[in-house]
Amino acid sequence: MALALARPASAPPETPSSTPAPAPLLTVERLSLSRGEKLILDEVSFTLKRGATLGLVGESGAGKSTIALALIGLLQKPQVGLEGTMALDGSANLVDATEKDWLKLRGRRVSMIFQDASSALNPCFTVGSQLTSPLRRLLGMGAKEARGRAIDLLESVGLNDAASRLDAYPHQLSGGMQQRVMIAIALATNPELLLADEPTSALDVTIQAQIVRLILDETRKRGASCIFVLHDLALASQACDEIVVLYGGQVMEAGPSDVLLAEPLHPYTRGLKACVLELDTDELVPLPSGAPSFASKTPGCRFAPRCGNALPKCVDEKPPLETVRGRKLACWNPAA
Amino acid sequence: MSMPSELFRLLDVEKAYDVGRKGGLFASGPRRRLAALDGVRLSLKAGESVAIVGESGSGKTTLLRVLLGLTSPSDGRALYREKDITLLQGEDRDRFCREVAMIYQDARGSLNPRMSILDLVAEPLDHHGLCKPSERRDRVAALLSRVGLPPEMMERYTSALSGGQVRRVAIARALASSPAVLVADEAVSGLDVSTQAQLLKLLRDLQREMGVSLLFITHDLGVAAYLCERIAVMYLGRIVETGLTKDVLSAPAHPYTRALLNAAPKFFEPIAEPLGGEIPSPIDLPPGCRFAGRCPEARDDCRASDPELVAGAPNREFACLHPLIGEPAFA
């Protein structure tokens, strides 16, 4: 059975969304992902508006990249267990999509920028051949047209001397330039959703600012939405409209970044924020160490063992994600 | 001359590499030089903490190799307790090895996966003959608990440890020989903020309680501000600004320092106009200030004459013809 995957022409599917405004571009509802006995994502829910930027934040092991990989169909059934809903505007539930379905989406409606550009680009092919490949394969352009378009794309991501860069191999470019090439490849087909998995963590701070701005400017220009996977809360507050804080595959707190980060309510968000160094930070209050358990039988909140506010109830029963003070919060005992 | 309290002194250290002729092995062009370090002056006093910041390619790691005696400068002198580091011999060399400890960026890669934590942490003790075999376990247990690891962990191997724990083992190993100086190369980069915060707190406590000097290489100004009293900002093989960290970061004099400061993410502020371009190749630099090509303040004389690092204010040195001092911070 083929799934409906086209860009929305017909009526979008019913989505239980709390916002009355136009249908969100992406709806993720109670998405769970398991590998064998391990439950990697535990009922993750969030929505993304068209043209908005969402940040997935949390420590390593929180499931941030896993969500991104699931959203671009690189983690599918039956390799992993998937339950719940993830749907692009106008598409069917992508939890059930097969590789054949994903081929119609991946690179067309959804594309991805990976963390390490030097290993995501193929060292054996020139920048030009990697950049024209989506144009030719997915958009059906001829060689000459694709080359012209590729030059435009490289110029739009700020590479000067674009025509000669097309014949360069990735190793001839600096890390920042490689990341720019990858952004150009991801944007080549004008996707509606761009996934950026820690796009700047391998780069210098000055280049990081350039790249984040570039991604924001280019997605905005195209009316596309963007999901950033980040671990830097300060950067998330600058780059993202909405933030989803994850721990151990569970959503702890989610909401508009200005509301959420100005006054975080979840003890985990507070702890994370207290770990961020600013120039005038004099005292750091680190979170206690610990790593989440992914055992599927954990009934309660996975952050409970590290939480200073934990109640006996936290270990036994999972708190529901409820709207509190302008954001969604999953906590039995939030900070006052 | 200088005060005896200075542990390290670098006097106009240069390190240039010959990178062959333009056009390949058989081309006839002039030989080209890559100046990884180009006249670096730096001193580290006992008990002091100094951060070295700059983008990749600014020469931070070469500077560190010179300090550790792994690379000899091609010009200038690198001194440890007033003796040339590369010429240290016998007792002086042993003392240098015992007193200067290194924490590497890739902590896991710096620790032998086939040695237990006990052997890894005890290796400096054994090498320098610092404890009796009967005290070995107790010493290691004390070191491990000092860095916040349970002593039971000494029977384990690094493969069983998390990234943060491995870094703690690397710190314990560096502390084993009771060093006078800890040299750390990006010791907290690539970690989760929570783990990073724990390690930074640990390093600051160690530095304050044990009085060790700390030379910390980082690209994160927040880390530099938290950990170090003094800061040296490097660009293309040269220190462009140095001074007390709080002074430098509250009122940068060099446009490059300001650019680094602006680029650091800050809560709720719009992303600052980034510094254009990238760090240029250090091969055959043009005349004039090496930052002129990216500098928003550059004027004609910047492209003609190369500014020296000079004292521009109390406790402050910078290499800029048109410094920003006097301007409000974050302008």
Image (cartoon, coloured by chain):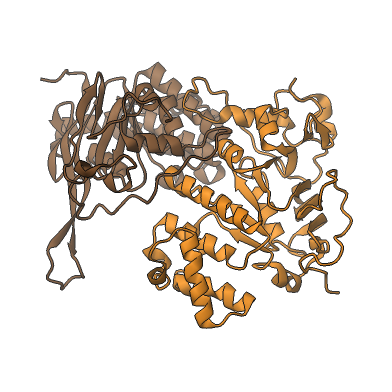
Residue appearing at x 52%, y 52% in the figure: A214
Nearest the eye: A315 or A268: A268
Question: Which residue sits furthest front?
Answer: B300
| Image quadrant assignment for residue A79 | bottom right
Residue B112 in view of the camera? no
Image colour for chain B is brown
Which percent across, then down, holds residue A53? Answer: 66, 48
Nearest the eye: B317 or A318: B317
Image position of A74 (left or right of B81):
right
In this view, A172 is above or below A202? below
Query: Which quarter of the rendering shows the N terminus of chain A?
Result: bottom right
Residue appearing at x 87%, y 53% in the figure: A15
Query: Which quarter of the rendering shows the C terminus of chain A?
Result: top right
How many numbered marks have been drawn onto this rendered protein structure? 0
Question: Which residue sits furthest left?
Answer: B1
Which percent across, then down, holds residue A186? Answer: 58, 63
Chain displayed in orange = A
Which percent across, then down, holds residue B277? Answer: 37, 51
Which percent across, then down, holds residue B300? Answer: 22, 44
